Image: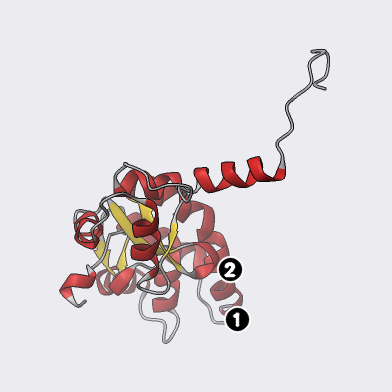
Amino acid sequence: MTRGSGRERPVLTLRELNRAMLARQLLLERARIGIVAAIERLAALQAQWAPSPYLALWSRLEAFRREKLWSAIERHEVIRARLMRGTLHLVSAGDFYAYAVATQDLQRGAWNRLQIGRGVDPKEIARLAIAFAREPRLKTDVLAHITERIGPSPRSTGSAAASARPRTKRSIISSGGASPRSGR
């Protein structure tokens, strides 16, 4: 019973709970929604193994074609980035920033612990990288920007800049990256 209402809440059977979970994950039947909407509904798609997102979407969407996913990535509607658990995921461009912010401290944490005693200020490097990468930038451009401002730091600045934003395909920071079609 719910408090004070005098009514009992319905309790799902195990089968009903299973069906609800499958439907929520678009696994009960193929849906007639677009790629971006599907990825947003699923929160994100694991993409560490290259075929994974294609198989996941093909299993869930009516009339899925891999070219549509390539196009969404090329148009930066879908972004491939290292996010949860440090693995590649596909997320919508609209959801990317929230995931990036939510996971950036965990991703930087391991690198920051290695920098103790090296004279590198991880927060300063992260601040510079994030400010510069408000639009899509190549990792090399971000590194050059940081090096111009704080000078080179052998074997550490690159890792800091890469950790300042989740890594995306081909080290393009905060961008959709290259498509599988382009071979990059």
Residue 95: give x, y in percent of width and height: 40, 47
Residue 27: give x, y in percent of width and height: 47, 51
Question: Regarding mark 2 in the picture, which secondary structure is present there?
Answer: helix
Q: Is residue 149 above or below residue 10?
A: below
Question: As drawn, which residue projects farthest toward the front?
Answer: 15
Residue occupying image coordinates x 35% and y 71%: 51
Work out which quarter of the rendered image holds the C terminus and state it.
bottom left
Question: As drawn, which residue projects farthest toward the left?
Answer: 182
Query: Which one is in front, 182 or 60?
Result: 60
Mark 2: give few (<14), some (14-19) or many (20+) Cα within 10 Å: few
Residue 24: give x, y in percent of width and height: 51, 43
Disc number placed over residue 29 in the picture, else none:
none
Q: Is residue 135 left or right of residue 31?
A: left
- What's the colour scheme? secondary structure
Query: Which one is in front, 35 or 124?
Result: 35
Mark 1 to mark 2 CA distance (whole Å): 15 Å
Residue that badge 2 annotates = 109
Residue occupying image coordinates x 19% and y 53%: 75
Residue type at mark 1: give it. Gly
